[in-house]
Each structure stands twice: as structure tokens, then as C-alpha cells.
Amino acid sequence: MRHQPPFHRSRPPWWPENEPWPPGGGRLRHRPFFRRLGCLFIIFAFLGLVGFLSLLSLAADALGLIHAPAGDLGWVAPAGAGFFLLLVGTLGWGFSRVRRMSHSLDDLLEASRHVADGDYSFRVEERGAPEVRSLARAFNGMAARLQTTDARRRDLLADVTHELRTPLTVVQGNLEGMLDGVYPADEARLKSILDETQVLSRLVDDLRTLALAESGALQLKREPVDLAVLIGETVTGFRSGAEAAGISLDARPGDDIPLLDLDPERIRQVLTNLLSNAMRYTPRGGKIEIRCRVDSTNVTIEIADSGAGIPAEELPHVFERFYKSRDSGGMGLGLAIAKNLVEAHGGTITAESQPGRGTTVRINLPIVE
């Protein structure tokens, strides 16, 4: 049985769901740098051989080892001198190229030390041979991603600390008050503590989902999904709440939606987050509509509300984690999770809004044949 290289094996469990396997089609890339280096070596060898044979012929004729008619070896000296000058020129050109390459590699080595020490802002100048410039460009891209990841990690720690502080303070304050006899251990107090622990539990679940999605490690359980049925089931869970709040909830998913290859629980989570936001910001007497349309490549879901809308300066940031408006009652994770889950399915999500005229969130999901 023929042995296959590792990249022909099946997709490993840790490989991101939204990236193809094997990477790059499983084929080895061409290496023009090594081809050029090989050609340069062949040229050096050829010129050296010709020069050596020319000098050997002249030396043999001078020593009388060979006897050539007068004038037959007259071309050897000029040809040998020409090949020698060409060899020197080629060696000089090769030396200058190697020197430039060595300078670029020294820069990369110095930059790698900075990155290893935690300085992700260090960049190298893209110069030298095309392959070295490509290496420098890849290094700069890697350093930029590391810098972004490090900044996200720091921001996440600060945001999580801030979000955990409030429920933990409430729980700790109530428990200390009960132990000191300041508060009675009655049902109301215990229910308040339970509510705060539920907030903590939701926060931990949301953070885990967000971390998996942002790292590309989220495992999607894809299956053929009837999107109209999924939307109908999700909307049904909000009917009673909408009626109690005096909000009209209208779902028109359409009948021509093809089966989509989706993770139904993750898409349900996206729809739930978006409907919860729409319910929160739609006043009594308002309206929420869920619409779908299909084109040749995508299914578009629109969730439109008649709420207060989002100010123009806040709209570009609504999908950032822990970003909350002044009157927000949530933790600022719902839209960030929705964005990452949609992108994990290969789709996109955008928001349009005008203050006083409501907000429309648009999801595009690809149709996979």
C-alpha cells in the first residue's frame, strides 16, 4: 500500500470548520528560489569548467604535451579571458545578491528575537529577493496577528473582570448580610442570589462560545436544515413575550428556501440573540419583522424592528464584544457571538439603522450545492 503524506489524511478534530482540508489542496508549492540557485550553480560550474579547460590547453601546449598547428589555439586565450571575466562578474553579482539576502535575514532574525520577547509591534522592511520579501511579508502578517491576539486577550481579561465584578459583589454582599443577620435568609433574598448566579452562568457560556468562535476551534454540527421551520420555531418562543409587551411579531420566511447545510442550534442561538435585542429596544405598539429572500448563492435573513434605532457613531461598533449602548441591559456579547457564529458558517452579518426609524440586521448564509 502506497504511503501518503500527512496532509492527505482526514481532517483532524482541531482543524477549523470553516477552512478547507487539506490546506492549499495538499500540493507542495513551487520553489523558484531553489531553482534559481540551482541554475546559478550550473552557470558557475560551466564557466569554471570552460576556464579550466582553456588554461589546461594553454599549459599543455606551452609544455609541449600537445602539438597544435600554429594559430589553432589562438582563440583559447581570449575565450578563456572572456569566460574568466564572465565568471568574476557572475560571482560578484551572486555575492551582492547573497549579501542583500543576508542583510534581510539578519533583520528577520532580529525581529524574531523581539517577537519572542513579547514585542509584537516590531516589523521588518520588505526587501531583497522576491522569496525573502515574501518571507518578510509573512513574518509581518504573523506579528500583526499576534499583536491583535495579544490586544484581544488583554481586552478580554479587562472586560471579563468588569462583567464578573457586579454579580459577584451582589452575591457576596447578600451572603455576608445573611451570615451577619442583617438580611433574612428568605425566599426573596435567595432568589436574588440565584438570579445573579444565572447571570454568571450565562456569561461563562457566552464567553466560552465566543472564545471558541474567535479562535476557529468551534465545532459545528452541520446537517440539512429547513430554515423556514427553524425561524418559525424560534419565533414561537418569543410570541408570548411579544404579546405581553404589546409588540407585533411577524415572521415571513417564505416557501422557496432550499435546505441549507447548517448547525441548527448555533443558527437558533443567532436568531435568539437578535430577536432578544429587537424585543429589548422595540417599544409597546412597535413591530418586529423577520423576512427571507433567496438568490443564486445566498439566503438572506432580515430582522427589522421599529425601535429607537442606533446612533451613527455607535453603529460600526455594535458587533464588538462587550460593546454596550448607554441604555443596554445586556452584557454586550450577543451580537459579537452572532457575528462569529454566522462567519463560522461562511456567512456575513450587517446592521443598518436610523435613529427613530428602527434597526435592520441582515444575515447572509451561503447556499452550498
Image: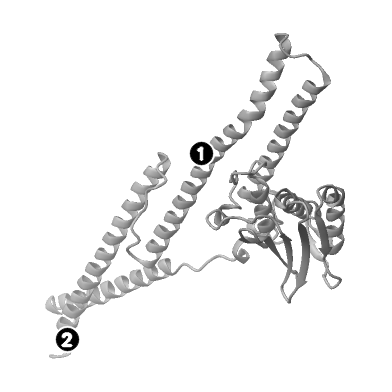
Q: Secondary structure at mark 2?
A: loop
Residue topped by disc 1: 154
Marks 2 and 1 sit apart, C-alpha to C-alpha, by 78 Å
Quarter of the image holding residue 234?
Answer: bottom right
Amino acid type, mark 1: Arg
Residue topped by disc 2: 73
In the rendered image, residue 173, in percent from the top left (x then y), is placed at 66, 19
In the rendered image, residue 345, in percent from the top left (x then y), is placed at 70, 59
- Give the residue drawn at x 42%, y 41%: 116
Residue 25: mark in rendering = none
**Is 118 above or below relative to 3?**
above
Image-based side of 157 in relation to 358, left or right: left
* Between discs 2 and 1, the one toward the N terminus: 2
- Give the residue drawn at x 37%, y 43%: 114
Which is more toward the observer, 178 or 344?
178
Which is more toward the observer, 125 or 155?
155
